[in-house]
Amino acid sequence: LCCECGQFHLLLDNHLYNFQDEVDDELICHICLQPLLQPMDTPCGHTYCFKCLENFMQEYNFCPMDRKKLSFQQCHKSSLLVRNLLDKLIVFCPFKAECQQTMQRCELEAHLQNRCPGFKKYKSELQQKKNPISKGKEDLPTKVEANTPKDPEVPSGGSSLVAESSAAAVVSLGTAEPGLVNPAFEETEEGESLIQKYNYRTSLVAETTTIEIHREDPEEELGMRIVGGKDTPLGNIVVQEVLRDSVIAADGRIAPGDHILEVNGVNISSVTHCQAVSFLRHPGPVLHLMVLQEKGFSNKTAQQDSTSATNREVIHVTLIKRDRSEPLGIKLIRKTDEAGIFILDLLEGGLAAKNGKLSRNDRVLSINGQDLRQGTPEAAAQIIQTTESRVNFVVLRQPGVQLSDPVEDGSTSNNSSSSSSNGGSPVHHRRRLDQNHYRRKSNYQKGYVSHEKTVAIKKEPKESLGITIGGGRDNKNKLPIYVTSVQPIGCLFRDGRIKRGDVLLSINGIDLTHLNYYEAVSALKSNAASHSVVLKALEILSLNSTEPSLDIKEQGFSWSPLWITWLGLPSHLHCCQDIVLSKGNLESWGFSIVGGFEESKGNQPFFIKTIVPGTPAFRDRKLKCGDEIVAVNGVPAIGMSNSELIPMLKEQRNKVTLTVVSWPGSLV
């Protein structure tokens, strides 16, 4: 709960307020559709919230309203007059049950801290809840059988490698012949394609590691997205994404593709998706995670790896920039004989040199939680440049190692970032993708069913709908428009039929399913001015009443639908994208798949389960764990078995086009 606004939201998101009166449209941010917070003016005359504009400019280089070219550095704070007008807007105390007071927006924080009986009661109840948490894992929600072996089974033909630390267990698995798709490491009964092992010069290294995560606020979200669960073909719980500036990103040891095996000593390798989310959202100051991490292919012997691991040290360093444009003063390069990025030099007088914790020859493993073990100096520089203040480095240090000649020119943290073009406007790109649908013969819904409903309401012309929305076909996952909240001041809250999580199909006959976020906002606002509104929406319902209810637990999180609910969406609402991978003759594609047709289970989608570091799929960075493969080189995958799809992928020598649907993982 935010102590400034008294409501639940992500630490980096805007504060939320319940306004007494309808706010003038001139004072509304056209990104979040809420009254402006820390307003910023653009050179083209538009005004947005500071955080909304900052987040938008990380992905785009134009103004959201008129699409004129724009950079964040060109924008400036709004005038004092505008800021004062916004601060004087009247808001309700968010604790309506215990406190009915109204006040100016700028006075709410002081009211909560000093006068509000509701906030005082909340803090008291929270303190009582926190006390038993430290007793240990007995307080974890939902009992789970923990008789599954903690360590992953090692198929025959694997040889042991020496662990880099006492907390890690490393296994090395022989891989299939070069060019095969699945360097998999798990049992065949889980449905994952397991290629016959051969004694080749390369091996796939996987490592189980126990990681201890500390949180100053026991209820702060970890900041990662997960996919999988025993109720999906993926089986295991897999990290899909690590969010920037999160607890997990600051720690730096967990990366996309890691499999989470245990939470606080309890095995979660055989729990449902919802149960796993519940475990990972359980509050506590310390979280113990056991994860399985693929380290890529290795052609070194166990003795060599043992020697190279000696004296290595993993170091965490945080540098704090005064503003986004401040350089760190680091020269980064690549080496000729080893993958990854290395620090060539620290510029005298620079931020890194003054900090004194980074050194020449350090290998950069990650920056702000983004895995750079196979990265480039340019990728590292881009991450640094787009970071507002805190830059979290995880580096590997081995005393006495001298740098070889670099493969290419290095990059420094203050290089000017180059803006890449997708060859056309975002709208044109989206339209092309929208035409590319692959309908399933039967929807894979696994515990969820979708129900279409029509809601017709009468309203005053000036009365707002009172909803906030997410998604849009310009979203990186190309989601349909869905409802993120129904505000208590609006006609839809009074009507009660539109709920959080509903997918909006149309308003007054206008199709919303192919629109981007801003087009959908415009359509909703223009039609909300009518005396009557007809909304068509899709509600996704759970068929499993025994699953833990996550709505209550989600109060501390910025709400978004669970990954598994998207799997119940009808295929005509899927938005596919093509990912083209290229490889050498002796390379593996570098990903493993699960799913496909089985006699006992019928048609199941194909999902990406693992992506191996150092491979074409990893280097491309577009494919993610949990992505659904719907076609290979234009041939639909529906109805194929695993044994049919694998040979098709093997036949593609140097290039393959995968058509995938990508749903965002559940936030924990």
Image: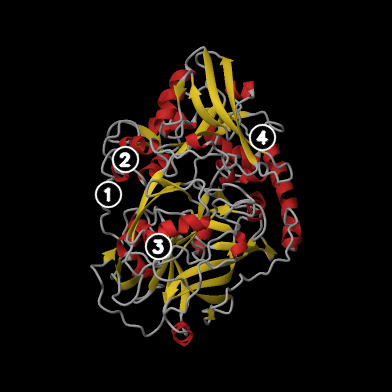
Residue at 44 percent across and 33 percent down: it is: 36
Residue 136: x %, y % from top left:
73, 63
Q: Secondary structure at mark 1?
A: loop
Report crowding for label 3: few under 14, some 14 to 19, many 20 or more residues within 10 A (C-alpha). Answer: many
Report crowding for label 2: few under 14, some 14 to 19, many 20 or more residues within 10 A (C-alpha). Answer: some
Q: Secondary structure at mark 3?
A: loop
* CB within 8 Å, label 4 to label 1: no
Residue at 63 percent across and 34 percent down: it is: 94
Looking at the rendered image, the disc whose residue lies closer to the viewer, 1 or 2, is 1
Looking at the rendered image, the disc whose residue lies closer to the viewer, 4 or 1, is 1
**Distance of label 3 from label 2 (alpha carbons):** 44 Å
Label 3 vs 2, first from the N-terminus: 2
Mark 1 = which residue?
Answer: 419
Looking at the rendered image, the disc whose residue lies closer to the viewer, 4 or 3, is 3
Mark 2 = which residue?
Answer: 75
Mark 4 = which residue?
Answer: 95
Q: Secondary structure at mark 2?
A: loop
At label 2, the amino acid type is Cys
Label 1 vs 2, first from the N-terminus: 2
Quadrant of image for the N terminus:
top right
At label 1, the amino acid type is Ser
Q: Secondary structure at mark 4?
A: loop
Disc marking residue 589? 3
Label 3 vs 1, first from the N-terminus: 1
Residue at 68 percent across and 63 percent down: it is: 267
